[in-house]
């Protein structure tokens, strides 16, 4: 203390005090800052909901009602959660182009920020499945692929086909192909069960299993070079039969015609 | 035959009397001839004549693909384990790592990924099988539409038909072996069909599977059937089929110098040896190329069979597709009586399935009975000159195709953006309506072509030359066909309908004609009566018109 007291009139003492004071103020600010930031977050959240409501009024309300309560043209969105919005709008299915057996995937016209705002608004209508975080659907364990394959064949392949190529349902409805679908959207589809798909909430299919299924689908539809050559659409024996008739037997008959057309000429003596 | 006699005489006195063979090949040939009589065999057969036409090579495609299937199949048996014992996969294919499966499936995955050339051989085996059955069907249709099944070839027609049916079933047993998800679904389908049979169904099922589905016996049993039983029978039938082809000699198209008593063409040695041998390698090469380019039956993607799993697009290979169609479009009717259920939804398709096949198999005998024709036929019919037969054949094909659409209704729905329900209703109606419509269209078409032939014979072909006559009229000049073309267009004989004997005999007493005879006469009129064939132009008609040819 004596040392400190002796140097209180040192020419740099004022600077040191100033620095300490600044550090203290900064520290205090830092200590209070989280509270301020939290307040700012709430503001951003309510801002997002407000913005989302505006987007909703323009793009969605004609079918789902001005307050998302639903109408004769579209179901109520109370309790569908942000995951459903992120899936439906993110894959371009919503807003729907026209009524029909099923709303198909098409080009998405919203930015991710707008989709988040819409999702925030719809989520505010009632609690529902929440948009997943990347660590929920991005698998790093290579064993997840084979586990996911088994789960996929048990739960998904009967509609989406063994390689995720999709298939027919009744009266023009269909299970779409999973080729080129984002991991997040696959996960959200399982959470929310869009259109004709059953939903697989965490109570029936734990998060871990959903992540494994996503790993299998991504591997099968995107990463995998097919060992046997052309896949012919991975649609099973129907396309194989068609290919066999045209390029197998068809080509052989063409060869036969060629062989028969080239014959030895009888010598005229 | 002659070989037997020469063998016996050969023992006493060698066929070859050459004292000093020119070289060691001749010596070897002499040695063999002295023991099995190859010279007389060769003399009788090496100069055997075959007519030249691409459609006569369809049977060759069948023969060669069959050989390819046997060769590749032998290779596959070296590595395939026909066992349903449970193993855990630990090979190089990541998406299956750590999954429990049968040894049959694991060994097929190993053939695909671990065995050198295994995947290519597997794909050659499977593609060749698809083409084999397709070629048999087309070959059979060629024989059908040209009337090559007529006497003396009815038995060979039946042999060929049996080969087709056995080929279909051997294919089914073959793709059931790997015990993947698709093949297991197919076996389950078959089990369901067996269970639908009243009274004996459950017993047959228990016997075949050695207990409840799936059990542990079905793959080893199918393996024996697939590699031994059916191929053995097929090999025997194939040899018999070829012996009969040699014995009957080949049929030929009508043409100058071609009669019912000769065969015009090229000799087996050397022309057909070269052509057929070369064609074998072309067939093998093409099948190998297809197998190198395109996947067939990607069992690794299907995953191992588990009774609680199923994938969409679970169809059989194309040749069983019409049975899939039958079962998919049949309404799910069932009758419950006294505690027993008769599942019509499965049983009716199971009964129609053999009928579809038998319908085409018995046709030669029906036609033979209707025409009452007991003569031998070695000159082929042009399809247009047998309108009813051609119409019936086309109707049969259309029925087959309609059922194939039914079997693939889900893919037609997704790829053509249709409702699967609409396709199913279409097939239900089409099953009855389409063959009838196709029959009448084809028959009219044939009659139209006959009229055109008649027109061509009588008035010649259009030259495209327009001539202006002195008084201003324009006429198109027709040119007479060459003599050989006239012959080809008029060589066919036209059957006349069978007439029932007069209702009363010469004494005015009513004569009895049985219902069968009356039916036959009616059918015969339907085949050859007025309006069912166009009378071909006679020489007199031709002369009359051509004599005044310049005037029109």
Image: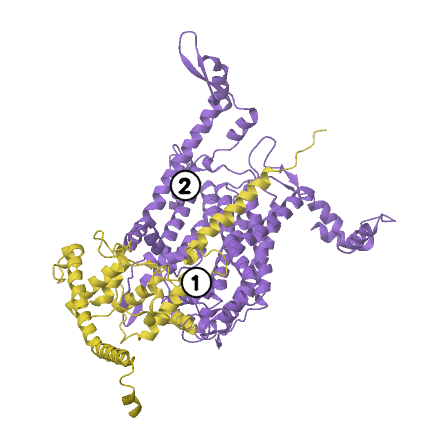
Chain colours: A yellow, B purple
Q: How many labels sit on residues?
A: 2
Quick one: SS at disc 1? Answer: helix
Observer able to see residue A10: yes
x%, y% of residue A153?
A: 38, 68
Q: Is residue B157 above or below residue B501?
A: below
Observer able to see residue B354: no
Task: State the quadrant of the C terminus of chain B.
Answer: top left
User: Label 2: few (<14), some or many (≥20) within 10 Å?
Assistant: many
Residue identifier under label 2: B391
Quick one: SS at disc 2? Answer: helix
- Name the side, left or right, on which B4 lies relative to A153: right
| Pointer 1 and pointer 2 on the same chain | no
- Name the side, left or right, on which B335 lies relative to B228: left
Residue identifier under label 1: A223
What separation in Å lies between label 1 and label 2 (alpha carbons)? 51 Å
Task: Name the residue: 84% across, 49% down.
Answer: B23
Residues B268 and B389: in front is B268
Given the image, what chain letter belongs to the residue carrying mark 1?
Answer: A
- Name the side, left or right, on which B283 lies relative to A33: right
Given the image, what chain letter belongs to the residue carrying mark 2?
Answer: B
x%, y% of residue B35?
A: 78, 56
Looking at this rendering, what residue extends furthest in the top direction?
B470
Task: Name the residue: 46% across, 40% down.
Answer: B371
Instruction: Give the number of the disc on residue B398.
Output: none
x%, y% of residue A147?
A: 40, 73
Mark 1–mark 2 contact, CB under 8 Å? no
Q: Is residue B501 above or below residue A151?
A: above
């Amino acid at each position: 203390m004596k040392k400190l007291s002796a140097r209180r009139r040192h020419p740099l003492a004022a600077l040191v005090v100033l620095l300490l004071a600044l550090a203290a103020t900064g520290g205090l600010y830092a200590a209070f800052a989280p509270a301020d930031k939290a307040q700012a977050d709430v503001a951003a959240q309510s801002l997002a909901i407000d913005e989302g409501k505006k987007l909703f009024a323009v793009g969605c309300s004609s079918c789902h009602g001005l307050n998302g309560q639903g109408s004769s043209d579209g179901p109520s969105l109370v309790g569908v959660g942000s995951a459903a919005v992120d899936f439906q709008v993110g894959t371009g299915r919503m807003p729907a182009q026209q009524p029909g057996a099923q709303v198909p995937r098409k080009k998405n016209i919203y930015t991710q920020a707008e989709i988040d705002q819409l999702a925030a608004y719809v989520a505010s209508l009632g609690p529902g499945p929440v948009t997943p975080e990347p660590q929920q659907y991005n698998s790093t364990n290579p064993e997840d692929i084979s586990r996911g394959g088994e789960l996929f064949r048990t739960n998904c392949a009967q509609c989406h086909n063994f390689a995720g190529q999709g298939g027919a349902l009744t009266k023009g409805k269909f299970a779409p192909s999973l080729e080129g679908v984002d991991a997040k959207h696959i996960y959200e589809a399982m959470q929310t069960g869009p259109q004709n798909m059953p939903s697989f909430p965490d109570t029936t299919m734990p998060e871990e299993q959903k992540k494994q299924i996503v790993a299998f689908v991504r591997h099968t539809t995107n990463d995998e070079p097919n060992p046997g050559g052309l896949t012919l659409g991975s649609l099973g024996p129907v396309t194989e039969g068609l290919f066999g008739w045209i390029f197998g037997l068809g080509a052989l008959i063409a060869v036969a015609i060629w062989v028969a057309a080239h014959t030895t000429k009888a010598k005229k003596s | 035959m002659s070989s037997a006699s020469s063998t016996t005489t050969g023992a006493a006195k060698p066929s070859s009397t050459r004292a000093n063979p020119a070289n060691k090949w001749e010596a070897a040939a002499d040695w063999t001839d002295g023991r099995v009589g190859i010279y007389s065999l060769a003399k009788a057969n090496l100069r055997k004549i075959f007519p030249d036409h691409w459609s006569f090579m369809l049977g060759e495609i069948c023969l060669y693909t069959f050989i390819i299937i046997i060769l590749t199949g032998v290779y596959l048996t070296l590595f395939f384990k026909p066992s349903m014992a449970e193993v855990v996969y630990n090979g190089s294919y990541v998406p299956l790592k750590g999954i429990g499966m049968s040894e049959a499936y694991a060994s097929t995955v190993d053939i695909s990924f671990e065995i050198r050339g295994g995947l290519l051989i597997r794909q050659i085996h499977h593609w060749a099988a698809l083409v084999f059955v397709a070629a048999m069907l087309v070959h059979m249709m060629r024989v059908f539409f040209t009337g090559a099944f007529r006497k003396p070839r009815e038995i060979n027609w039946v042999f060929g038909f049996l080969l087709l049916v056995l080929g279909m079933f051997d294919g089914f047993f073959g793709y059931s072996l790997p015990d993947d998800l698709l093949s297991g679904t197919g076996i389950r389908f078959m089990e369901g069909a067996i269970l639908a049979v009243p009274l004996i169904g459950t017993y047959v099922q228990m016997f075949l599977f050695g207990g409840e589905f799936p059990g542990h016996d079905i793959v080893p049993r199918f393996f024996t059937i697939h590699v031994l039983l059916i191929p053995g029978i097929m090999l025997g039938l194939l040899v018999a089929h070829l012996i009969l082809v040699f014995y009957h000699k080949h049929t030929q198209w009508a043409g100058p110098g071609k009669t019912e008593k000769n065969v015009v063409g090229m000799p087996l040695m050397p022309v057909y040896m070269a052509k057929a041998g070369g064609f074998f390698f072309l067939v093998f090469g093409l099948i190998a190329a297809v197998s190198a380019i395109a996947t067939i039956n990607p069992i690794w993607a299907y995953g191992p069979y588990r009774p609680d799993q199923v994938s969409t697009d679970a169809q059989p290979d194309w040749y069983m597709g019409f049975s899939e169609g039958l079962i998919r479009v049949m309404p799910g009717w069932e009758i419950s009586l006294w505690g027993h259920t008769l599942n019509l939804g499965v049983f009716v398709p199971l009964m129609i399935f053999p009928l579809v096949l038998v319908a085409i198999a018995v046709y030669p005998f029906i036609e033979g009975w209707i025409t009452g024709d007991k003569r031998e036929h070695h000159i082929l019919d042009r399809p247009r000159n047998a309108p009813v037969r051609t119409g019936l054949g086309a109707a049969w094909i259309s029925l087959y195709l309609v059922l194939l659409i039914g079997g693939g209704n889900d893919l037609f729905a997704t790829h053509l953006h249709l409702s699967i329900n609409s396709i199913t209703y279409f097939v239900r109606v089409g099953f009855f309506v389409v063959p009838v419509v196709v029959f009448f269209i084809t028959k009219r078409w044939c009659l139209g072509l006959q009229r055109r032939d008649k027109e061509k014979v009588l008035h010649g072909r259009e030259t495209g030359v327009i001539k202006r006559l002195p008084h201003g009229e324009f006429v198109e000049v027709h040119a007479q066909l060459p003599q050989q073309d006239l012959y080809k267009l008029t060589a066919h004989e036209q059957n006349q309908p069978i007439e029932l004997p007069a209702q009363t005999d010469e004494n005015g007493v009513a004569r009895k004609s049985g219902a069968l005879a009356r039916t036959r006469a009616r059918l015969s009129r339907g085949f050859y009566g007025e309006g069912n064939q166009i009378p071909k132009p006679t020489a007199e008609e031709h002369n009359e018109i051509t004599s005044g040819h310049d005037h029109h």
